[in-house]
Amino acid sequence: ELADTPLVIRDLTKSYPGGLTAVRDLSFRVERGQVLGLLGPNGAGKTTTLRMLMGLIQPTEGDITVFGHTISPGAPVLSRIGSFVEGSGFLPHLSGAENLRLYWAATGRPEEQARMAEALEIAGLGDAVHRRVRTYSQGMRQRLAIAQAMLGLPDLLVLDEPTNGLDPPQIHQMREVLRRYAATGRTVLVSSHLLAEVEQTCSHVVVMHRGALVAAGEVGDLVSANGEATFRVDDT
Ligand code: ATP
């Protein structure tokens, strides 16, 4: 059953040298087709969690499994995860499509037209993929960066604050991109420090504070009282 689950995080802890514990006893799981928002203020430990998930740093304790395979630096299962790096340095004088082809070639994988076409379709850039990147809005650049993360159609798409710097219409388009991706039966994990954004873009949410999970559930179960996010949490 673990082998069918895109992501299971168990008792995850990360302490940095010097004694700071950035993530503490974190456990949650994500099912296929979910868009899960990792919500928390700056310093809550979201980036540290995502970096462990991407195999960039090692947990101090606990483990992360993707379809039953344990994540560690260099683990083969990392090829099933697509990750997005903000402002991933596109060449402005090349078109979006040309940038993606260059990136794909640089990863050493054979170009797969069908996958690339599907990723571009989901990213929703339309004919703009043939325009030079220097003509793109911030929202379009961000969607191109997500198209890049989606190129291999990874089972798990991991996005660290993809809506940073976007205006509401651009955030709306981002939501459509993430939903279309999850609707293919793949899974999205996205971090944000804004409750409204998670409410708009995600199906599920894990709320972190000072490294620990404080609430988790379906976004529809989020109850907002006095501007504070609270939850009706079942103790299942
Ligand atoms: P942000 O949105 O600001 O990135 P975050 O929720 O992603 O917030 P993290 O970046 O994971 O939070 O940081 C959690 C805590 O760990 C912070 O107090 C941060 O200063 C600390 N931290 C992060 N990286 C390191 C590091 N390499 N060495 C020491 N402490 C670190």
Image (cartoon, grey):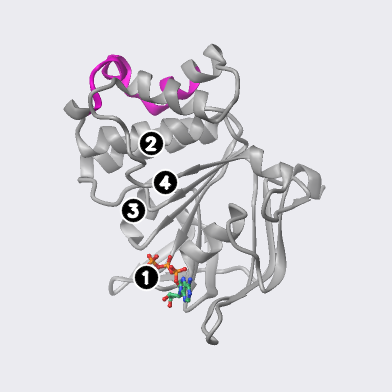
Looking at the rendered structure, the kind of residue marked 3 is Glu
Tag shown at residue 85: 4
Q: Cα distance, mark 4 to mark 1?
A: 19 Å
Task: Say whether mark 1 is within 8 Å of ligand 1.
Answer: yes
For residue 170, which quarter of the picture?
top left
Residue 18: x, y in percent? 53, 86
The number of numbered discs placed on residues in the rendered structure image is: 4
Q: Cα distance, mark 3 to mark 1?
A: 13 Å
Looking at the rendered structure, the kind of residue marked 1 is Pro
Q: Cα distance, mark 3 to mark 4?
A: 19 Å
Label 3 vs 4, first from the N-terminus: 4
Tag shown at residue 145: 2
Disc 4, disc 2: CB below 8 Å? yes
Label 3 vs 2, first from the N-terminus: 2
Q: Is 148 placed above or below 68 here?
A: above
- Residue annotated with mark 1: 41
Q: Cα distance, mark 3 to mark 2?
A: 19 Å
Label 1 vs 2, first from the N-terminus: 1
Instruction: Report the span colored magenta.
Output: 118-133
Tag shown at residue 197: 3
